[in-house]
Amino acid sequence: MQSINLAEHTVRELNQLLHDQSKDLVEDQWEVSETSGQHNIACGLNQKLNVGIKGHVGYFCAGMNQHAHVTVHGNAGQGVAENMMSGTVHIKGDASSAAGATSHGGLLVVDGNTGARCGISMKGSEIVVKGNVGHMSCFMAQAGTLVVCGDAGEALGDSLYETVIFVKGKVQSLGADCVEKPVSGKHLKQLKKLLDRAGAEEDPTHFKRYGSSRQLYNFKVDNAY
Amino acid sequence: MCGIVGLYLKNRSLESQIGSLFSPMLEAMTGRGPDSAGFAVYGDQVPDGSTKLTLRHHDLAYDWDALAHRAQTQLAVPVEFVRNHHAAVFKIAADAQTSSAYFSTHAPEVVLLSAGQSIEILKAVGLPAEISSDFNLTSMKGSHIIGHTRMATESAVTLEGSHPFSTGQDLCLVHNGSFSNHNRLRTELAYHGYHMKTENDTEVAAGYLTWRMDQGDTLDESLQHALKDLDGFYTLAIGTHDGFAVIRDPIACKPAVLAETDDYVAMASEYQALTSLPNIDQARIWEPEPATIYSWQRDSH
């Protein structure tokens, strides 16, 4: 286990040490402390590392993650795990807006709530939020799955493509082209697996499923001026 | 991009330390706003019927003594002042209108930054650390304080464009974002008799709140109206004589974090600015919801 104290090292130094592991893996257990809400912590990792971050983090933590398992023992600022490709990012506290934005793969778990635009334009990742998500979550989301164990804010899934959304609580409103869809055994199985991976003790039958009605996929000449 | 910070003390025994608690918060937001900075501190209240003005002159050698003497003679009321770098805080035993009118007529060379019974606004172009040091922020005492670090977008990098903005007594505003309908609102406010001094969009928002409160709105009511009438991106921190409020626009593009303990409420654009506060580890920390008013009001002094 290597410990890095961010009161003594810069984020750039930390990230370089973590990036160096992608060539020659010498140490796969890392602990980061004294984070003080700094931005860009543990970004661009490309190795099977376990990174435990003690404290709150700023913007873009674990952005572009590949293979690594990053755990934040605190809250995360905007764009946590943005553009994640693979691996796992686990936020023990709350996350701000745009959590998991444009993420292609991997699993993002938020134990608390997220701000607005959770999973905006997500492209294949899996996101499990144990609390609530803010407005415009999954805006223009293309692939992957968002699971919300709490409530969802306004305009959920606006202009949605093929991302599947499961929400247990209330949905304040659905965005354009997002509709509720029936939940089949196949969906329950998929949801159960994801809830188990995220460590969320929820009954999958309590969730509703939302998806795209695919009415915005093609240009409608009647709407042209 | 700009940085905004606010600190509102619930525990009055901390009032003597507000400047030293706040100075690192302001400086932590240098990355979001390196071109100008400023703060509004509420404290050292003058009695009813008296007024406190913050005046500024670009010349450090400006003769504030002579101005105070002239004001005292011509207004025929006691006038005291304390010089602070480019600024001077005047205490005048007259109402705000009489006091402000005196200086705008007889000392047009000085800029009036704030008027009220407890507010003092100090701001300048430059790095937050320099401004904090120039105005000796760490020694300030008070009940609440809000500050701003600016990266200009809507108007030039000038003292006039720097925050906080005050357009009414003991009212001030700092803003991260941009208003898209400030020109139309400026015209409407002029129609109601409120004339803005600068081209800056934030001053219009401050003027709007002043107008609403003059119409009888409470702070919360004025902010309810603001949610309908102000168009654009904004996170605002607002200070009044005895209140402190934070509000974000319905889209909530501009960041904000709130922290509350038994001793204080603190607000910042980023959590980084809160890390130096005492017992922040035990604070309740949350992101304010869009289009939601968060306000705290003190019991009257």
Image: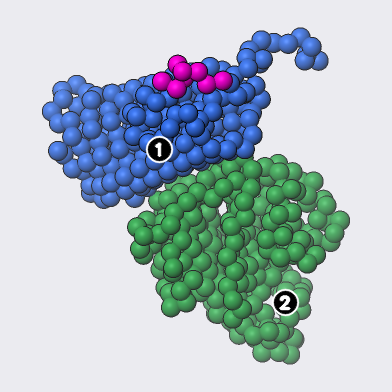
Q: Is residue B82 magenta?
A: no
- Mark in the foreground, 2 or 1: 1
Q: Tag 1: Cα neighbours inside 10 Å, few (<14), some, or many (≥20)?
A: many
Magenta stretch encompasses residue A188: yes
Q: Which mark is residue A110?
A: 1
Residue B260: x %, y % from top left: 46, 61
Q: Residue at x 46, y 41 (%)?
A: A131
- Using the rendered image of the protein, determine whether residue A123 is visible from the camera's viewpoint: no
How many numbered marks, from 0 up?
2
Quadrant of the rendering where the C terminus of chain B is positioned: bottom right
- Where is the N terminus of chain B found, in terms of image quarters? top right
Local crowd at mark 2 within 10 Å, few (<14), some, or many (≥20)? many
Left or right relative to B263: residue B293 = right
Front residue of B75/B21: it is B21
Provide the secondary structure element on which disc 1 rests: strand
Rendering coords of residue A127 (x, y %): 43, 29
Asked whether residue B185 appears in the rendered view, the answer is yes
Please identify the dominant SS of the magenta region.
Answer: helix
Q: Residue at x 43, y 57 (%)?
A: B284
Task: Between residue B256 and residue A118, name the one nearer to us.
Answer: A118
Horizontal side, residue A70 vs residue A216: left or right = left
Question: Whole-Å distance between the Cαs marked 2 and 1?
Answer: 52 Å
- The hue in which chain B appears in the rendered picture of the protein: green
Amino acid identity at mark 2: Ala
The residue lying at 56 percent from left, 43 percent from top is B254
**Disc 1 residue type (three-letter):** Val
Subunit ID for the residue under disc 2: B
The hue of chain A in the figure is: blue
Asked which secondary structure carries label 2, the reply is helix
Span highlighted in magenta in the image? A182-189
Residue behind mark 2:
B96
